[in-house]
Amino acid sequence: MRVALFITCVNDTLFPGTGKAAVGLLRRLGVDVEFPLAQTCCGQMHLNTGYRDEAVKLANRFTETFAGYDAVVAPSGSCAAMVREQYPHLDIEDIPKVYDLSEFLVDVLKVTDVGAYFPHKVTYHPTCHSLRGLKVGDRPTDLLKMVRGLELVPLPGAEECCGFGGTFAVKNRDVSAAMCADKIGNVMKTGAEVLCAADNSCLLHIGGTLRRQKSGVRVLHLAEILASTEESAE
């Protein structure tokens, strides 16, 4: 099976550690994952702000870059949803099979125990695109439950949006901030040390507020927790 990593713009620019973690995890599980250097933006931001022609150009580049791969793994629910949900409406042909990381692990590799070790109290935020678009369901939490040393605690109001929504946070900052404040309040109720999600754009939004409030709660992408081992924890 030829597998490629689509790192996404946010991860490539701000969270390269997430991409490295995803590659390390997949290789540990025996997947010979490749990283096509020609990859760029999937066009989500452009389409969401009304630039359809520009989004189509990027979508066509995406399909050309990832042509020939049996699976494309993306550590981002929003970008995976863009390809799967929006590309057909843009009349894009030969769309590659794109999976959220948790989908690929559980549905394709058929594993939930990835050999991870992370001795911390964790709560999980299901991002909107992964929850409502991709419908990944319990896959991320099933993976987290198998991590040795990890205590998974439920997040009150977990299915409520954090208020990021890409440009929504810019155009409607007061509403966005209020939604994030509600999410932070629920995170603090859990007593968790770490807030986990499968999309760094939401973690960027929530994490910024957590830091400004000096909450002491860290945010980590699912890939980074699943890539952790006893050796890396030492």
Image (cartoon, rainbow, N blue to C red):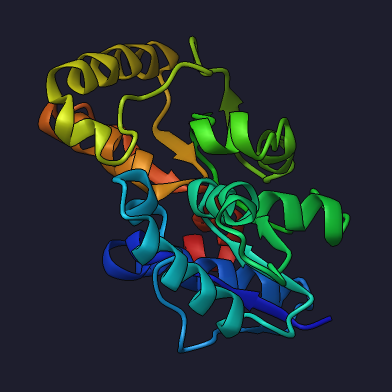
The quadrant of the image that shows the N terminus is: bottom right
The residue lying at 57 percent from left, 66 percent from top is 22
Residue 65, percent across and down? 56, 84
Query: How many marks on residues?
Result: 0
Location of residue 97 (image quadrant)? bottom right
The residue lying at 26 percent from left, 32 percent from top is 168
Left or right: residue 2 versus residue 201 is right
Location of residue 194 (image quadrant)? top left
Left or right: residue 139 versus residue 133 is right
Residue 90, percent across and down? 55, 56
The residue lying at 49 percent from left, 60 percent from top is 233
* Residue 229 can be seen in this image: no
In the image, residue 120 above or below residue 54: above
Residue 13, percent across and down? 28, 68
Left or right: residue 4 versus residue 216 is right
Residue 157, percent across and down? 48, 10
* Residue 83 can be seen in this image: yes
In the image, residue 6 above or below residue 204: below
Task: Please tell me which residue lies in front, 48 or 7.
Answer: 48
Task: Please tell me which residue lies in front, 20 or 101.
Answer: 101
Location of residue 12 (image quadrant)? bottom left
The residue lying at 38 percent from left, 51 percent from top is 47
Task: Please tell me which residue lies in front, 227 or 51.
Answer: 51
Of all residues, the one furthest to the bottom in this rendering is 37
Of all residues, the one furthest to the right in this rendering is 110
In the image, residue 185 above or below residue 116: above
